[in-house]
Image: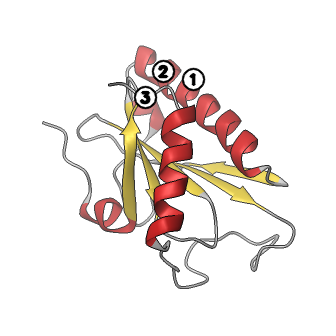
Amino acid sequence: MFELNEVLARDSIFVGSLPLSDVRLINDSQFPWLILVPRRDNVSEIYQLHLDDRQQLMAESCQVAEIMAEIFAPDKLNIAVIGNKVRQLHFHHIARYASDALWPEPVWGKLPAKPYASEQLANLLQKLQQKLPLEQ
């Protein structure tokens, strides 16, 4: 049975489910940042997924990227699978701006997270849930 890594659970907020992956918002208001977490056990790398799941993950990643581009209008989207600290497969999608505090450097481990204010979070979740093709 699929179980979400405790670090991912602690650091992110559930947005909704796509056919393969859960969409989660990293709770850091400095960077619009979504992760896709395929609901598959014991997988840390994309190549470990079955071919159909790999293709589905890429389709979901493109959907998330398109919606992030529409909502956030970033200068660049950083899309990556790293997993050095959290082994469970998760696919980062981070909207970046030339004006952000870390541009052009990576965001990982550089600044402490600034959680979303409750109203800001509610508004963002509503926008994302309206745009993403989430399962009901």
Tell me the residue that label 3 is attached to.
Answer: 134
- Report the Cα–Cα distance between label 2 and label 3: 14 Å
Going from N to C along the chain, the mark reached first, 1 or 3, is 1
Q: Is residue 67 left or right of 103 when viewed as pictured? A: left
Which residue is at a point 64% across and 30% down the rendered structure image?
A: 62
Vertical side of 49 occupied by 3: above or below: below
Vertical side of 87 occupied by 129: above or below: above
| x and y percentages locating residue 14 in the rendered image | 36, 50
Q: Secondary structure at mark 1?
A: helix
Q: Are marks 1 and 3 in contact (CB under 8 Å)?
A: no
Question: Dot 1: within a 10 Å radius of its alpha carbon, few (fewer than 14), some, or many (20 or more) residues?
Answer: few
**Callout in the foreground (2, 3):** 3
- Report the Cα–Cα distance between label 1 and label 3: 13 Å
Q: Are marks 2 and 3 in contact (CB under 8 Å)?
A: no
Q: Are marks 2 and 1 in contact (CB under 8 Å)?
A: yes
Tell me the residue that label 1 is attached to.
Answer: 59
Q: How is the image coloured?
A: secondary structure
- Tell me the number on the disc at residue 56: 2
The residue lying toward the viewer, choosing from 126 and 68, is 126
Q: Quadrant of the C terminus?
A: top left
- Tell me the number on the disc at residue 111: none
